[in-house]
Amino acid sequence: MRLLAPPCGKLLGGLLLAVAANAYAGESQACLDWLKTVAFAGHQTDYTGVFVYQYDNRVETSRITHLAEADSEYEKIESLDGPKREIVRHHGHVWSYNNHKMIQMDSHQGRGRFPSLLPDQLSRLGSNYQARREGMERVAGYDAQVISFQPRDSLRYTHKIWVHTDSGLLLKAAVLSDKNQAVEQYAFTQLQIGGKIDRSWLNGTASSSSEHNSSATVHGPDLLDPESAKYVASPTNSGWVADAIPAGFKKTMEILRPMHGRHAPVTQIVFSDGLSAISIFIEPDDGDEDDVDGLSSRGAVNLYHKISNNHLITVVGEVPPRTVMQVIDSVRFNGR
Amino acid sequence: MKQEISALMDGELFEDEADKLLNRIGRGTVAHKDWEIYHLIGDVLRQPEHIHCDLSARVRDRMRDEPTVLAPRSHAVKQKIRTVALSAAASLAAVGVVAWMSQQIGTESPSQMAMQNNAMRPVSIQIQPKSNDYLMAHQEFSPSTDMNGGASYIRMVSYGPEGK
């Protein structure tokens, strides 16, 4: 017995460790499964509701309507306070309705549907964040499972989501700083899932009647801003690199794209850690005095402009200010 | 005792506790010394440029009172032990100060912490509406769009300070 005891203890210890590791892996997997459900439900469900967006001591209220038709998805977001603004997404394209003008905002990549979570994105997420279920809460009258994603370093934010247990729809989402303070959050205050939802805005006919005159509708290409429609985004290898991308971020694309309000095409390089992304934009400096150097932010998004070697470099990401600054300081041209 | 004094200085004691402690400080010399030293450390930490503490006179006085030892050293070993003991004491004292400092930092209320952090954060202004196009272009390929769906696009059209 005396001889057997030490290996027994080791075995038991190892077993306990294995069980703990398994439990951890199981927990993480359960959370990632929830995420998949959220992504799927977000695409496949018809819903309409009012949500608040809270950021930087501000609160904005908007209505969102999402319809999954046989051919594709349609989505409309309209602001309910402040100046009237509207965004329509359809067939992978994004239109913004502002000042009585509809402008196509996307890169004309022409993707047939909204992006959804890819397997390698999920595995990257699992290695950069510790996912944990945090019990049940009620949001907008629905029961929600709370899940938190704690980053492994301070170069990212903590993300927390509230998922409707029945439909899998996201009811609330918060981004927290390392001091556990909310940087921004979305939350539905009212939500209708399925049932009778107004579909009149799906085709252009609605715009001809006077009462819908100011409402954005999905039109043909004739209403697009001709300036922005000149180019179509194409994959590129610009030769620009950033050496100080935080560990865990992986380059997901590099394109030469048109951008509204810009004369020349803009190089965009995107890095993602599975939950948040960093975009680097590089374009020739047009000498516009208004392109101020420095940091600005809106909620969880931080943006940094810098002019370097006759190029305007812009870094945007849902990451803390210091991450954006670290990245922009490391951007350089490495030759083609 | 030391912890209580530190707590008192941070205003974290209840009234009756504070009264009791102040009484003790008034009577006991050790407690009174601690009280003085803590205040000195606090002053130095807060505004080092205003501290003009000239110790040289007191050091000179103390050295004058110190008896001059003219006898040769009996044992080199003994001296060594004493040095070790002294340095150990010194490092203990250093640990004491560090522990006290970290406690000082640790007991700050969250609001105090937030104020300090704001002061130290890089200057950050609201993203200008003219930069919305960059946000929109970024959002198109961000995984947060997968998670939050269209709701994350509201960020792009937020009217910000100018729309107010």
Image (cartoon, rainbow, N blue to C red):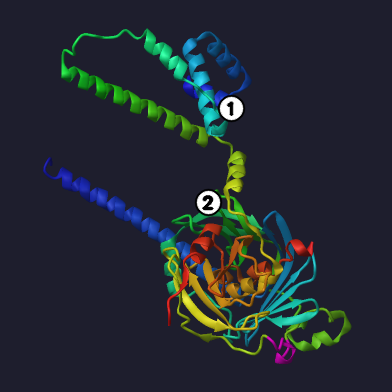
Residue at the spot x=66%, y=88% of the render?
A229
**Letter of the chain that mark 1 sits on in the rendering:** B
Left or right? Give the position of B49 relative to A94. left
Q: Pick whichever, B102 or A158, lies toward us.
A: B102
Q: Residue A197 at what x, y percent from top left? A: 74, 76
**Host chain of mark 2:** A
The correct choice, above or below, for B140 with respect to B103 in the image is below
The amino acid beneath tag 1 is Glu
Q: Which residue is mark 1?
A: B12
**In the figure, is residue A116 to the left or right of A58?**
left
Which residue ends up furthest to the left in the rendered image?
A: A3
Q: Quadrant of residue A50?
A: bottom right
Q: Judge left or right: residue B113 versus residue B163.
A: left
Q: Quick one: A67 or A265, which is closer to the camera?
A: A265
**Does dot 2 land on a helix, a strand or a loop?**
loop
Q: Which mark is residue A109?
A: none
Q: CA distance from mark 2 to mark 1?
A: 26 Å
Residue A226 within the segment the image draws in magenta: yes
**Which residue is drawn at the image coordinates 62% and 71% (left, top)?**
B135
Magenta residues span: A219-227
